[in-house]
């Protein structure tokens, strides 16, 4: 009976938001996830960021219907006394339910199969071009194809990281390791660690690692206050080195993107050989070893060092298109400082993302992630369905007076460069003294 229920207020729930004491609310029922956070497949970051709040929308976004059955064992016996659902959340949940009934989360199409076939063909062309030809132009073309291979392989890793794109979880994990670790040299464990935090804390300057690029880039002057990264657990020092780099970031953005992969390689190694708990550490290390066996071996087949340097730089430069795309999706969107709040899920995603408009025949190139808002709202949605739901999301944003930004690739670049330029010009204000730099920040920051 209703009278027998035990209640706590949102204020009391908020007290349980620290490591070792993590409570959340889903549909007004309060759950203790302190111990579960250690076993959670998505890691403990979502709980550390959202604990103390109602997280119904985030739970719906990330979990299939079968996950609800696992909540009972975490129930504290309390209900949220002042539980309230906003009109935006009501519409979002209704939309998620309708999509589920239509089977859109299960209708994956043949995107993964086509992607893997294209990756296999490109790998053959790359190896054949390097090993069988002596032409510099053929070697350059092979490098460019390798860059495209890395882009498409990363999309497969991204898709399999968000949902099961293969026939079983085992094959899905295999797809992750092959497409991520073995082919691109970037650990799927590192990607999950950072990517889950990015989705949960979309465009929070101190919680979203995808915006924390000090000392090289700063998308907001808030970074000039040397914010503390709650993801990395350290201060993002805005020192003299950072001021110098950021002052010219609108000029250095594209050159840095051309070699951004180097930082991802470094971040992978830093995580896999750290003391942090890493799921499937041995499997991830084995996959990385595969990459660092075949890639240097392939490069060694080139006849001289100038061609080898050209090959590596050209392949990295092509892959920079993907790095640039990811930056376009968020760098010029709204930012904020602080933890995300679970009950404004829809609003945070709309304000922190930007879509790239393109023709349907270019969907393969962008991997579905040109529909960045749609992906953030429904991360389990297969990419082949995102174009279909886009008009519905547009209408929902209009209804609630929320931003839906969709720009051409060119216009998104212009907007991003303008954002970087604005911060760069303010960084040049030498009236603000800064502390001495720490060169470690240049290496140990995710980019």
Image (cartoon, helix red, strand yellow):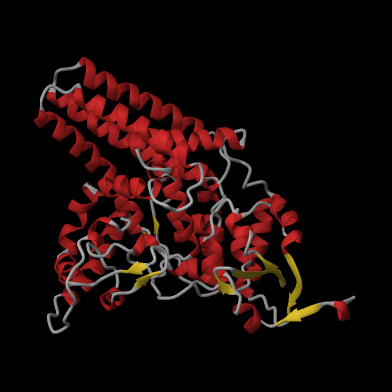
Q: Residue at x 39, y 54 (%)?
A: 357
Q: Is residue 333 left or right of residue 399?
A: left
Q: Residue furthest front?
A: 275
Q: Residue at x 34, y 45 (%)?
A: 269
Tally of marks: 0
Residue nearest the viewer, comparing 199 with 89:
199
The answer, for residue 406, to whether it is visible in the render is no
Image quarter hosting the N terminus: bottom right
Q: Position of residue 292 (x, y in %)?
A: 31, 32
Q: Is residue 260 left or right of residue 381?
A: left
Q: Residue at x 49, y 56 (%)?
A: 196
Q: Residue furthest right?
A: 1
The image shows residue 349, relative to residue 141, as above or below, that is below
Q: Position of residue 111 (x, y in %)?
A: 50, 36
Q: Is residue 317 left or right of residue 83?
A: left
Residue nearest the viewer, comparing 364 with 59:
59
The image shows residue 260, relative to residue 297, as above or below, that is below
The quadrant where residue 150 appears: top left
Q: Position of residue 115 (x, y in %)?
A: 44, 33
Q: Residue at x 21, y 57 (%)?
A: 253
Q: Is residue 374 left or right of residue 334?
A: right
The quadrant where residue 22 appears: bottom right
Image quarter hosting the C terminus: bottom left
Q: Position of residue 413 (x, y in %)?
A: 27, 58
The quadrant where residue 248 appears: bottom left
The image shows residue 441, relative to residue 140, as above or below, that is below
The image shows residue 93, relative to residue 156, as above or below, that is below
Residue nearest the viewer, comparing 309 with 290:
290
């Amino acid at each position: 009976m209703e009278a027998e229920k035990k209640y706590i207020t949102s204020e009391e729930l908020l007290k349980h938001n620290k490591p070792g004491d993590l409570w959340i609310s889903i549909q007004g029922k309060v759950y203790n996830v302190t111990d579960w956070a250690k076993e959670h497949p998505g890691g403990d970051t979502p709980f550390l960021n959202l604990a103390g709040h109602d997280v119904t929308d985030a739970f719906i976004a990330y979990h299939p219907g079968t996950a609800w059955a696992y909540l009972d064992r975490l129930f504290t016996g309390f209900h949220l006394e002042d539980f309230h659902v906003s009109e935006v959340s009501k519409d979002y949940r209704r939309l998620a339910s309708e999509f589920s009934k239509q089977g859109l989360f299960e209708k994956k199409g043949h995107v993964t199969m086509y992607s893997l076939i294209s990756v296999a063909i490109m790998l053959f062309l790359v190896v054949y071009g390097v090993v069988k030809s002596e032409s510099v132009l053929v070697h350059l073309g092979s490098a460019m194809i390798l860059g495209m291979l890395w882009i498409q392989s990363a999309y497969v890793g991204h898709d399999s990281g968000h949902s099961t794109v293969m026939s079983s979880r085992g094959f899905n994990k295999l797809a992750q390791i092959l497409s991520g670790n073995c082919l691109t040299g970037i650990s799927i464990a590192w990607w999950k660690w950072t990517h889950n935090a990015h989705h949960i804390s979309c465009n929070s300057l101190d919680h979203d690692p995808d915006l924390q690029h000090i000392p090289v880039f700063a998308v907001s002057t808030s970074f000039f206050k040397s914010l503390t990264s709650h993801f990395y657990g350290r201060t993002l020092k805005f020192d003299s080195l950072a001021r110098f780099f950021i002052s010219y970031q609108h000029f250095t953005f594209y050159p840095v993107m051309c070699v951004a992969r180097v930082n991802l390689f470094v971040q992978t190694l830093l995580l896999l050989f750290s003391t942090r708990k890493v799921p499937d550490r041995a499997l991830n290390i084995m996959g990385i070893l595969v990459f660092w066996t075949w890639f240097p071996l392939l490069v060694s087949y080139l006849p001289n060092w100038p061609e080898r340097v050209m090959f590596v730089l050209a392949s990295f430069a092509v892959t920079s298109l993907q790095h640039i795309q990811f930056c376009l999706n968020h760098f010029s969107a709204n930012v904020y400082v602080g933890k995300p709040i679970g009950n404004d899920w829809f609003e945070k995603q709309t304000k922190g993302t930007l879509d790239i408009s393109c023709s349907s025949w270019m969907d393969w190139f962008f991997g579905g992630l040109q529909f960045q808002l749609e992906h953030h709202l429904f991360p389990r949605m297969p990419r082949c369905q995102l174009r279909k739901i886009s008009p519905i999301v547009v209408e929902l944003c209009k209804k609630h007076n929320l931003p839906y930004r969709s720009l051409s690739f060119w216009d998104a670049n212009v907007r991003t460069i303008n954002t970087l330029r604005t911060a760069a010009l303010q960084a040049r204000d030498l009236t603000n003294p800064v502390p001495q730099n720490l060169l470690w920040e240049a290496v140990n920051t995710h980019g």
